[in-house]
Image (tube, rainbow, N blue to C red):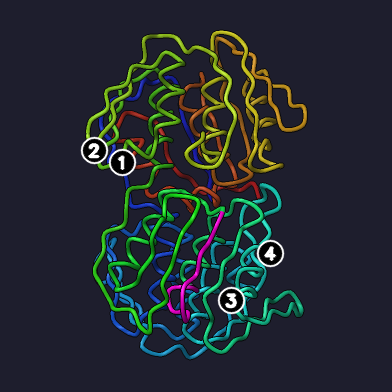
Amino acid sequence: MHKIVIRGGAALSGSVEISGSKNAALPLICAALLSTDEMTFHKIPVLRDIRTIKQLLLQLGVQLDDFTQGSLRIKAREIADHTAPYELVKTMRASVLVLGPLMAREGRADVSLPGGCAIGARPIDQHLKGLEAMGATIDLCEGYVQARSNRLKGTDFTFDLNTVTGTENLIMAASLAKGTTVLRNCAIEPEVAELAHVINRMGGSVHGAGTDTIVIEGRDRLNGIVHEVMPDRIEAGTYLLAGAITRGDVTVSQCEPAHLSSLLEKLDDAGLILDVEQRSIRIRSNGTVKSKDVDTDPYPGFATDFQAQYMALMALGDTRCRITERVFENRFMHVQELSRMGARIRVSGRTATVEGVTKLSGAHVQATDLRASACLIMAGLAAEGVTEVHRVYHLDRGYEFIEEKLSQIGADIRREKDDIV
């Protein structure tokens, strides 16, 4: 077990290069199951979640080759096993993304019900309803989804609610199905469009990704390609917020500003100075942070994955604001830890009222999920004194080399062995 130790108070300054997107890489690695050809991906981030999905593919009998850091060669010529076991899936709910491609190619999958961060219920019933509409039979047995079919068939399916992984799973399932599939009320996140783009490059036919209606023409086979993973928009936004909370001058490079429009609008409202170029964003402080309300929403709204970090920034705002979490029902667990550092926050249902204070103070705090980990690190960067963030194993699921990157722009931060469990 490790902890992150931060001596706060330094204004961050410099440039940070953004890594490949975790949330894009995970479905792309699973999409390699759709072809018997070799697939090569570049800009794969070095993260615990990536290690988990690679272990899962190895479990299925797929050949993997990390021939250089950040590059992964995948060859799924044969699939020897069709089981995604509890021991792997419990650590990361995105493991359920093998369900669609296994059903598309093999007509068989036994997938443990997923785990991941404790930020609220995220059921996979939409994945299963969609597969049933495509002709699969679904049974739940001892915590496993047991899905079976002959070749899946095209269908017209409407999601009951917005689901990114559900949309991705059904796109992959439909890519090798017989006939045409129309998916309605789809998630429109950039990572969904990235998956569709890759499948099209493989010889598939996916139209409408990035809108709420996607049409997939099933193919008999898909081909191997070489692809570079898109930048991680959540990582980019987190470093922008780190620059803001420390009243620094930070540039994030190798990013996609169009994917951050809601965050950039809110930072502009809060009084931050932004210089946006084609592949980079510079953020500077004018000395104050204006308190501004925000509601989280699915893309293109304000991302729930920025909510905790934004709350840390608003804890130092000039007055009072309200932050409403509309995506997950249990994503305010960082509030108690921020309060230990001197933040004034009151929660009622899905809304947190944040009263800005003039300073935060270093403290011992515990991370409860991935983005809460980033939130507490950001608060520590701005706080007076030393902050120790415990239980940071969540952090390694989603941020590549975060201590090194923050150190490069002036943070006094290090990782140490932690005796506190």
Quadrant in the picture for residue 414: top left
Magenta span includes 182: yes
Answer with mark 2 or mark 4, whichever residue precedes in sequence. Answer: 4
In the rendered image, which residue does mark 2 sit on? 279
**Stretch of the chain drawn in magenta:** 173-184
Which residue occupies 30% across, 69% down?
A: 72
Question: For the residue marked with disc 3, what is the amino acid?
Answer: Met
Q: Are marks 3 and 1 in contact (CB under 8 Å)?
A: no
In the rendered image, which residue does mark 1 sit on? 256
Question: For the residue marked with disc 1, what is the amino acid?
Answer: Glu
* Residue 401 in the image: above or below residue 173: above
| Disc number for residue 134 | 3
In the rendered image, which residue does mark 4 sit on? 125
Which residue occupies 31% across, 43% down?
A: 18
Percent x, y of residue 416: 48, 45
Foreground disc of the pair 3, 4: 3
Q: Is residue 330 left or right of residue 27?
A: right
Mark 2 Cα shell of 10 Å, populated few (<14), some (14-19), many (≥20)? few
Foreground disc of the pair 1, 4: 4
Question: For the residue marked with disc 4, what is the amino acid?
Answer: Asp
